[in-house]
Amino acid sequence: MQQAFDWAIEQADSVWLETDMRAHYNPTRMGVIQQATQDLIAKLNHTCPNCGYPGFAITEHQRGLPCELCGQPTASIRSIVYGCQHCGFQQTVEFPDGLRFADPTYCEYCNP
C-alpha cells in the first residue's frame, strides 16, 4: 500500500485516497448481508400451515403486554401475527417471548 502511494505521489502533486466501501470489501456490510441471508433462508423454510407455501413470516407485532404491577397495557409486545402472502392465512401467537407480564419499568402508568 505504501509503495503504491509513493508511486502515485511521484506522478502527481496530490493523491486522493479513500476506502473501498463496496459491500464485498467492507466487513460491517458483509455481516449485515450475512444476517439478511440467514433471515431469508429461515423465512423460506417456514411454510404456511394452511397452503404449504414458503415465506410464512411475521407481518405484525401487537403491543399491550400487561404491566406486572398494575395490569395496564404497556408498549411491550403481547403477540405477533404471522401471515402468508400466497393465501392470506394469518396466525396470532400470544406471548411469543414466554412473558405474560411486563416489568413495571416499561409501564407508562407505574413509571411515567
Image: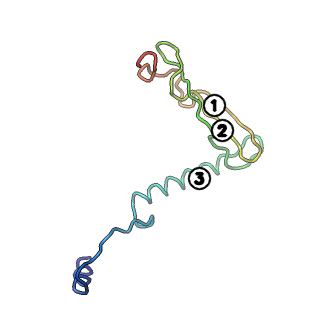
Mark 1 residue element? strand
Asked whether the beta carbons under mark 1 and mark 2 sit within 8 Å of each other, the answer is yes
Does 13 appear above or below 112? below
The residue closer to the viewer here, 76 or 9, is 9
Place of residue 54 in the rendered image (x, y in percent of width and height, measured from the top left):
69, 50
Alpha carbons under labels 1 and 2: distance apart? 8 Å
Label ID, residue 82:
2
Does 57 appear above or below 61? below
**Counting residues from the N terminus, which is met first, the one under dot 3 or under dot 2?**
3
Q: Identify residue type, mark 2.
A: Tyr
Which residue does the image show at 40% across and 67% down from the upper left?
25
Place of residue 53 in the rendered image (x, y in percent of width and height, measured from the top left):
73, 49
Which residue does the image show at 53% across and 53% down from the upper left?
36
Label ID, residue 40:
3
Which class describes the residues within 10 Å of circle 3: few (<14), some (14-19), or many (20+)? few
Which class describes the residues within 10 Å of circle 2: few (<14), some (14-19), or many (20+)? many
Alpha carbons under labels 3 and 1: distance apart? 21 Å
Does 86 appear above or below 4? above
Label ID, residue 8:
none
Alpha carbons under labels 3 and 2: distance apart? 15 Å
- Split into 4 quadrants, where in the image is the N terminus? bottom left
The residue carrying mark 1 is 93
- Split into 4 quadrants, where in the image is the C terminus? top left
The residue closer to the viewer here, 23 or 40, is 23
Q: Quadrant of residue 95?
A: top right
